[in-house]
Image: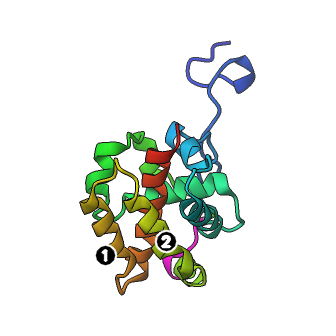
Amino acid sequence: MQFPYLIPWYWGGPPSTVDGDGCWIGVSSVFEARILTPVSSYPLEQLRQRFLYAVVDPHDVRLGARVALQMAFEIDTASFLNKLITVPADVIGSKVCQRRRFLDIDADMRLQRYLIGPAIDALADIPEVPEAYVDLIRRYAMAPYARYRTCALAATVCLSARMLTV
């Protein structure tokens, strides 16, 4: 009796990271754990909590961290995030079935719009964040398209997690 390819987890084999529908159920990456860590800036922390809550249904922040990381790399903010964040290849391509639509997330975050300006200003106050990065995020946060606005908030969450957590 040989098991060359299928070794059950109780014999030391790796657990599966996808379920029967192809949805991601694995362990969070190192950077996703940083996204789940509270940040020291109050406006950025309030935005982080509400955004991670809004991006998936049911509201699971562990899945929200994966979705936020994926969203941050969907627009032009990926050009500078690639310089700052090392993301495993399977994170961007994984399928999170609980992910909500951009219009739904945008509708929820519009109710929290009083947090967005102060959070981006707090991001600009971090000395290690170049002004050009904050300007790009600010432009996308005011864009007429829900996808751009939502991805700009995801980039804000990821950049604050990179700069303000250990």
Q: Secondary structure at mark 1?
A: helix
Instruction: Give the residue type that dot 2 points to.
Output: Pro
Was residue 101 drawn as part of the magenta stretch in this picture?
Answer: yes
Give the quarter of the figure containing the N terminus. Answer: top right
Instruction: Give the residue type that dot 1 points to.
Output: Arg
Identify which residue, 127 or 35, lies in the foreground. 127
Q: Position of residue 48 (x, y in %)?
A: 58, 61
Q: Which residues lie in the magenta part?
A: 99-103
Q: Which of the 4 image quadrants contains residue 141?
A: bottom left
Question: Going by the image, does 127 lie left or right of 61?
Answer: left
Earlier residue among tags 2 and 1: 2
The crowding category of the residue bearing disc 1, from other C-alpha atoms within 10 Å (few below 14, some 14 to 19, many at least 20), is few
Residue depicted at x 72% and y 66%: 58
Residue depicted at x 35% and y 50%: 127
Residue depicted at x 47% and y 53%: 160
Question: Going by the image, does 93 lie left or right of 6?
Answer: left
